[in-house]
Image (spheres, coloured by chain):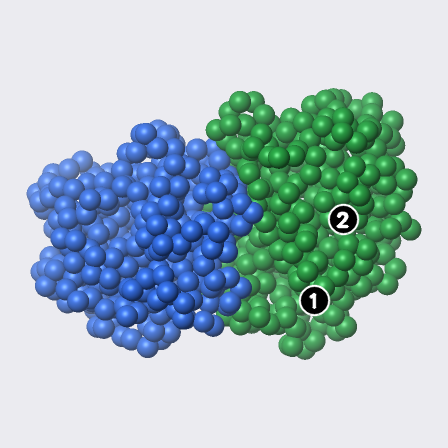
Chain colours: A blue, B green
Amino acid sequence: MRRVAIIGTGMTKFGENWDQSYRHLVVEAGIRALTDAGVSGDKIDGGYMGTMASGRLIGQEHVGALIADYMGLNPIPITRVEGACASGSLALRQGIMAVGSGMKDIVVVGGVEKMTEQSTGEVSNALGGAGDQEWELFMGASFPGLYALMARRHMHDYGTTSEMLAAVAVKNHKHGTKNRYAQYQREITIDDVLNSKMVADPLHVFDCSPITDGAACLVLAPMEIAESYTKKPIEIVASAQASDTIALSSRESITELKAAKIAAEKAYKQANVSPKDIEVAEVHDCFTIAEIMAIEDLGFFKKGEGGKATLEGKTEFGGDVVVNTSGGLKAVGHPVGATGVKQAVELTWQLRGEAEGRQVRDAKLGLSHNVGGSGAPAVVHIFKRGY
Amino acid sequence: MRRVAIIGTGMTKFGENWDQSYRHLVVEAGIRALTDAGVSGDKIDGGYMGTMASGRLIGQEHVGALIADYMGLNPIPITRVEGACASGSLALRQGIMAVGSGMKDIVVVGGVEKMTEQSTGEVSNALGGAGDQEWELFMGASFPGLYALMARRHMHDYGTTSEMLAAVAVKNHKHGTKNRYAQYQREITIDDVLNSKMVADPLHVFDCSPITDGAACLVLAPMEIAESYTKKPIEIVASAQASDTIALSSRESITELKAAKIAAEKAYKQANVSPKDIEVAEVHDCFTIAEIMAIEDLGFFKKGEGGKATLEGKTEFGGDVVVNTSGGLKAVGHPVGATGVKQAVELTWQLRGEAEGRQVRDAKLGLSHNVGGSGAPAVVHIFKRGY
């Protein structure tokens, strides 16, 4: 396998983008990524696009073809991959495989979701399709409900508190104030979270990531030619994916994501690094409890200590590892298919030193953790400054 | 890239499978494929699954995770790919890339769709998501309508007749009588087609493939170890994909699929063969006109002569190339995500000499042609007897 680098990045502002349709979102992000890479369309060999629920949300499947068409790339093929909220990272994995194998040289990878055209109820049903439709969604278990079960058990087993959960949201909103692409760019307090409406006890509305429109794109190239496009190639030194049961009720434990632990272990091995080497991480905080489990599953903190570590500021700037510098799913927003790619975009900016007011100083190694549904599958990538 | 072989095949009966849910379909096909390959689950390194519209049709996205779970493969990841009716072939392409690149050794590839749980109207809407939702579906252009436009123009330009269209359906139904997996296993006549209800002039209901439940699976391995699993490995000697505009109205011509022509040209080059070398082909006859365009686009017959060739029996047993020995989408049925994989299953059986009463004698080289929506994208694979 050849070494693979990111040579271009682009994203739209995430939010309620009423004036942009699905195709406009992805074209904007795609053109930004191509421009950033200094690559013209005729150099592109193919692409992979992550989208979860375009069929339910905008009545459009077949989005690979749509995007190839609207990006002006025909007859170059773009293929859609889907793995719920991990769709973006799965698209990235396919892109890495295509370039790494030598089958393709320059590949675009994207993620996009247009969520605000439907009612909240319909979006909730569509997202419920990421769980086990026969055994969860049809029984009334929506995603806030599933993550509330995990949170409640984590509180019971490890003494995690509502304040600790809230601290995740507070930190990510703080980071989001420095990110002009974020849906929410204002600070909140622990009291704001605790006093916000209860969605599924113990999760308040401010414990939940929002419904969002947005797209993000990357351009990949083999490492050996990356420097002819950019002075700052970012190498992808690990890409790992694992799966777990789709239904929460079938798991041995609901206070950790086994798939994330397995994927992380594989990724550390591929990159030949350990958790303490990671300086900056984008993790999947679809709910605040998810970030706490993530930083434990990734080995940044001992099992059960993620909440305490967050409350103590160990995942903020100046802490052991800076988590969700972008603002995470919580503040940047969570257009599900786009999130995994957005994480890679943020880490590229961090490792290039281009993260504006939220730069982790001299960061050389970053990690992304992207989860589908309630944790099957999980995808971990590790990125390294390649210059 | 390593050479890649098919070492196992399996499929469910296609039809109105009221007693099988989505997950049961794919597990049945998957277990048959693993059994056929003599491979136990713990040897599998990963998988790719083609499904078009599970979100709309059964309320379930995230089907890669679902399938890994129900196949008992966790933590091995399975990734869903989607490209409308070409989803199955796109999954196969990802599997080939994974094995060919050396990233994985034994990979399962599947395709599945469960379509009969929804009303015909809802299925029609969901399938409409394979067209351009903003410019076609929302304007009332359903798929029979789009293919009717192509048929009418083909008739105008080349003198193709309704009898020629009907001859495609008659042939494929005849082949289907020999296939115990086919939805329809009875012969029809040209008069049956011409007297059947008009759906979208000039396409009668018997010019259209049906709504179907079904799944098909393959097991892939590198050629160099394939013989340790099977005495009859079938090598995949070409895999090519191209894209065209998603909306029919944007095309230069609507009597051919440009993406199919480009993909075919690439595939012939990869395999170093010409159209006349192909002995057996499975082509995408979602409507009868589609098969006529396919056999022209693939270079089996000159442009405009596909209808006449069909009526003259040149695509039947004993003809120049036997097309859709399985019965095609028309008689076997068209569970959209499964079709591309089913084509590969049929060709594997043909090249192994296991096609029962529909065997093309001593077939050594077969081709599959799988199309998404109205022709963006198209995927062509070429298979060769590897023993």
| Residue that carries the numbered disc 2 in the rendered image | B299
**CA distance separating discs 2 and 1:** 22 Å
| Residue that carries the numbered disc 1 in the rendered image | B235
Q: Residue at x 80, y 40 (%)?
A: B306
Q: Indicate the quadrant containing the C terminus of chain A: top left, top right, bottom left or bottom right.
A: bottom left
Residue A10 vs B187, above or below: the answer is: below
- Specify whether residue A340 is in view: no
Give the quarter of the image for residue B310: top right
Q: Position of residue A41 (x, y in %)?
A: 45, 50
Question: Of the residues tagged 2 and 1, which is closer to the observer?
Answer: 2
Residue A239 vs A80, above or below: the answer is: below
Q: Position of residue A76 (x, y in %)?
A: 53, 50
Helix, strand or loop for disc 1: strand
- Specify whether residue A34 is in view: yes
Of the numbered discs 2 and 1, the one sitting upstream in the chain is 1
Q: Is residue B58 left or right of residue B265?
A: left
